[in-house]
Amino acid sequence: MAEIEGGGGGHKKGGKPKGKKLSTRVDFTPMVDLGFLLITFFMLTTSMNKPKTMEINMPVKDKVEEVDKTKVKASQAITVLLTENDKIVYYFINEKTGEPETPVITNFSKSGIRSTLLTKNKELLAAKGFNNLDSIPIYKEMYRLNKIDEATMRANISAIKNNKDALIVVIKADDKAKYKNLVDILDEMLICNIGRYAIVDITDIEKELIQTAMAVK
Amino acid sequence: MPKVKVPRKSTSVDMTAMTDVAFLLLTFFMLATQFKPDEPVTVNAPSSIAEVPLPDIDIMTITISGDGRVFFDLEGQQYKEELIKKMGALKQVTFTPEEIKSFSLMSSFGVPFGQLRELLALKTEERAKIQQKGIPADSLNNELADWVWQSRLVNNNVRVAIKGDQETNYPIVKQVIATLQDKKVNRFNFITNLNTEPVE
């Protein structure tokens, strides 16, 4: 409690003159005021959310032997070109001719690149008889409810994501693209559960492709 | 009818409990607060749904400002001391103990190596005022590569985090990534803010 028992109560019988007992009660109000002031200050200055990060793995830059390269079916890949004003130009490679198909201009909205990636990925997987893409949220939910441990969840999810027949995304950004666009498209990879993607330097042919696609529009 | 006398009660309340709680909270907030190191440039990081928190230790941060300047920082005072000594040895510059101390206490910096001495001589408040040019990262004079390489020699477990501004142009980001790849750093992190937009 706020009071402290005053000492000196021991020799009452001695008949000595008693000193007047002063109250030891202290007024706490200023201290409390100060305490709350400091609380307010620290509460306002504390930022609780730590920055998050996105992990990127780039291929080793050394020359890769032609034999070591993974052969990818043309129909399985989509090339996504990032350009100015948050625009995306994407195209597929025609499997028969080996030529790029007509490029399509889209954007970062929900109905833009995301729906394209999701539909195409589902299509590809369904053609091969895999339709387990929908089980990713289920695994996440199971982990949340502590039914499976984190390692199991990660293993299961990455097995689905790295399916051999799933969509492969080649990301290329031109010189007018912003850093935000790159992060956004990588974010789409996370959202669309695409495990296999690569950031590649853009070629001159593709720069022209963007130009013509924009001109047509 | 005689009036009923209500005994007067003291209005003084025992504040001890409240004070206890107040100081408990105060202690919590004081300990939980991490003051932001004064950065030479404000960077508005893009947002993403990535939920992995950034580690506190063993990390080097490459900051790219909106106008394309590159800044560098290595976490950990002892590592920074080692780093400046190693960089000095590489560039054949010897730093005084004061300069080494000053470097180890400095947060992110962005000047060419030649100007580092001048920057270290300045006081912290003066440093914030001057416009730092950015670390050269082009193919002609790639000092960023040296910083990255020496940092990895100093601390083996160091990881690279790139903190770019939303409006940074892609070519400069590409250059930084190419530099990292040159130095055999093929795994790195992009620092983002958490975006809580629902995803279907």
Image (cartoon, helix red, strand yellow):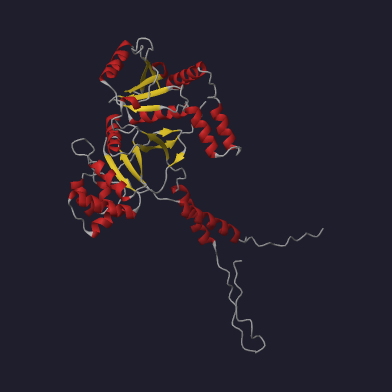
* Nearer the observer, B56 or A62: A62
- In the image, is B137 to the left or to the right of B51? left
Residue shown at the point (38%, 22%) measured from the top left: A71
Look at the image and tell me whether residue B15 can be seen: no
Pick the quarter of the image with the N terminus of chain A. Answer: bottom right
Q: What residue lies at 33% left-to-right and 54% top-to-bottom?
A: B77
Q: Is residue B30 above or below residue A128?
A: below
Q: Specify the quadrant of the image occupied by residue B47.
A: top left
- Quadrant of residue A7 within the rendered picture: bottom right
Q: Nearer the viewer, residue B187 or A115?
A: B187
Q: Indicate the position of residue A128 as horizontal and vertical percent values.
A: 50, 18
In this view, B80 is above or below A161? below
Q: Is residue A160 visible?
A: yes
Query: Which residue lies most toward the front here?
Result: A67
**Residue B62 location in percent, x, y?**
32, 41
Left/right of residue A20 with respect to residue B90 in the rendered view: right
